[in-house]
Amino acid sequence: MKPGLAAFFMIVLAGFAQAEPARPTLVSLDYCADQFVLALADREQILAVSKDAERRFSHLRAKAAGIPKVRAAAEDVIALQPDVVVRSFGGDERALEFYQRFGIRTVQLGYADDVQGTVDVLRAVAAEIGQGVRAEALIAAMPGAAAETGRSALYVTPGGVSAGQGTMIGSIMAQAGLSNANIGEGWTDLPLERLVQAPPALMLTAFFGFDDDATDRWSVSRHPVMRRLMAGAQVIAMDESRISCPAWLVADEAQAIAKALK
């Protein structure tokens, strides 16, 4: 390439670089928001993540290492002077107007109750922080649905709560090729009497040993009938860090369940 032509292209490329808008600086206020910020943002964009960013239930906790942590208190957030605050449930909603007065934009995570819905949430957050390309890469890498197995599964937690129809857990089951043995709508109590009459062959468990308060002596998980049912079933322990937030990570959990069935 001739020297003059090379210089021309350098000037054009420099112009494009200057025209590209700067990506906003970010603070995330809770561990759900952390997952989106840690997965999508450049590290230099992130001023701070939540105090829970490295806890066991935060899937991307390793990426949070070395990044400052912040309380969700408005005064602490404003002191960092971010361009954008990303939140799911963290912080006081009354502070959002306060942030606006300081020129800080708030991105509220949307809600998804099925695997496909997490794609929309991911794209929406990415658009707000200038990371659409990265979001599309994450979406392209999401595992597809497994073939139907003809099997059903029951979701079990230590406190005796199960997931019925219309829940994210039910959607994860469908993605893994399973049907939901819980025919109720939404979140329901485990019906021990019905389970005794028709013991489930497959159980998906989560949060066992995760919270001592959830497994006290009165918990359903300690009931001798429940223990007998679990002993007679195939039990697959779910990764709580992939299901504690309605994020694209649930597709990976569905894939892990499908593999555990084989």
Image (spheres, rainbow, N blue to C red):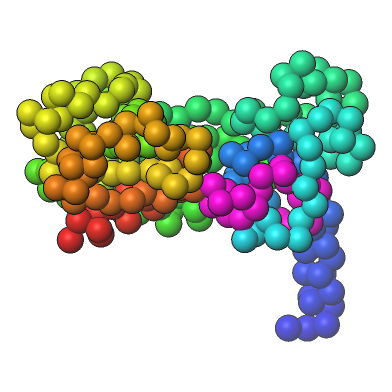
Q: Residue at position x 81%, y 70% from top? A: 10
Q: Is residue 1 left or right of residue 200?
A: right
Using the rendered view, name the quadrant where residue 163 is placed: top left
Q: Residue at position x 74%, y 22% from top? A: 92
Queried whether the magenta region covers residue 22, the answer comes back as: no
Q: In this rendering, is residue 200 above or below 38?
A: above
Queried whether the magenta region covers residue 57, the answer comes back as: yes
Q: Position of residue 106 (x, y in %)?
A: 73, 28
Q: Is residue 100 left or right of residue 181?
A: right
Q: Nearer the viewer, residue 165 or 130?
A: 165
Using the rendered view, name the quadrant where residue 15 is placed: bottom right
Q: Position of residue 94 (x, y in %)?
A: 77, 16
Q: Residue at position x 76%, y 33% from top? A: 72
Using the rendered view, name the quadrant where residue 1 is placed: bottom right
Give the magenta part as a residue range. Answer: 42-61
Q: In this rendering, is residue 50 above or below 38?
A: above
User: Is residue 215 something one can see in this rendering?
Assistant: yes
Q: Residue at position x 63%, y 28% from top? A: 89
Count the numbered circles shown: 0
User: Is residue 171 something one can see in this rendering?
Assistant: no
Q: Is residue 85 left or right of residue 208?
A: right
Q: Position of residue 119 (x, y in %)?
A: 46, 40
Q: Nearer the viewer, residue 175 or 205?
A: 205
Q: Nearer the viewer, residue 33 or 138?
A: 33
